[in-house]
Amino acid sequence: MNTAVSPRWLIAGEPRPGAPKLYCFAHGGGSATEYLRWGRDMPGAEFQAVQLPGRGSRFREPGFASMEALVAAFLDEVPLSPAPFAFFGHSLGSLIAYEITRALRDAGRPLPDRLVLSGYPAPHLRHVRVDDPLHHLPDDELIDRVAKIHGGIPQEVLDSPELRELVVGALRDDYRVLETYTWRETEPLPVPITVFGGSADHPRDQVDAWQQHTTADVTVRQFPGGHFYLREEPAPVLRALAAALRDVGPR
């Protein structure tokens, strides 16, 4: 493992000695900085936002062609904290957090004390169309299709050719990772899982199916709203996230 972590992977929030670290993985096309704003309202965690290539300070870096390549690079370049830590992911970020946890387990490395997974059904349930992959679409059609399916792309981006050009690369990279992903059957994780979701997003049975992927407890919380429910009413989501981290303590 490369012990000299490249700082480009992580954007650190306010230092909070003694608090567990929370590594946050953004949704498809998303940037790490969105989650750093949460840190002001959650003093019980030290935020570490994961920045993937193709956005923010890594705008000029090429993205990953597969989930396997992304996970391998993360494990090689990001030595995780030896202190208690947890993972949070939203949408594609949930799948990335889950796959990184599986890779840590397979490598015999310390695991997060909890996975908090948002806006994503259990990974063995295929829910993206592989016969009509979005990542092959022309730029404008890709952005418009994603905005129609999930929302989450600000109107100022949709209205600006310059901003659309800035976001489309990361969006295409992330949808390539998602649409070429194949779940591999393996032993469940020994890590408790908290699942968040919008009541108008994925069906409840697809969310409850995360129980198959852990030998520990699963807690499911649904909030009013759609795929980006956490932007619509962030306060109750942050309270639930803080509650989920209360058992993340010294190893």
Image (tube, helix red, strand yellow):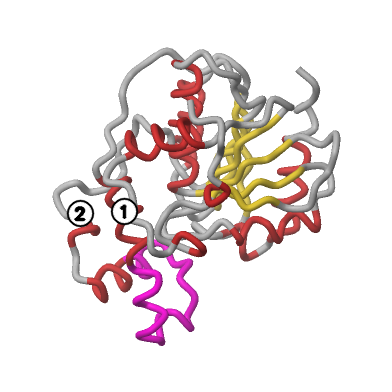
**Magenta segment: does it hold 151?**
yes
Residue in the foreground of this view, choosing between 35 and 191: 35
Residue sitting at 73 percent across and 27 percent down? 84
Could you tell me how far apart the alpha carbons at marks 1 and 2 are, in whole angstroms? 8 Å
Q: Are marks 1 and 2 in contact (CB under 8 Å)?
A: yes
Residue sitting at 47 percent across and 31 percent down? 75
Residue in the foreground of this view, choosing between 29 and 212: 29
Residue in the foreground of this view, choosing between 48 and 212: 48
Whole-percent x and y of residue 129? Answer: 22, 49
Whole-percent x and y of residue 161? Answer: 35, 85
| Secondary structure type for disc 2 | loop
Whole-percent x and y of residue 225? Answer: 57, 60
Q: Which residue is mark 1?
A: 175
Q: Amino acid at mark 2?
A: Pro
Reading the chain from its start, which is encountered first: label 1 or label 2?
Answer: 2
Q: Determine which of the numbered discs, if any, sits on residue 133 in the image.
A: 2
Using the image, determine if residue 23 lies above or below residue 212.
below
In screen coordinates, is 63 left or right of 113?
left
**Magenta range:** 146-168
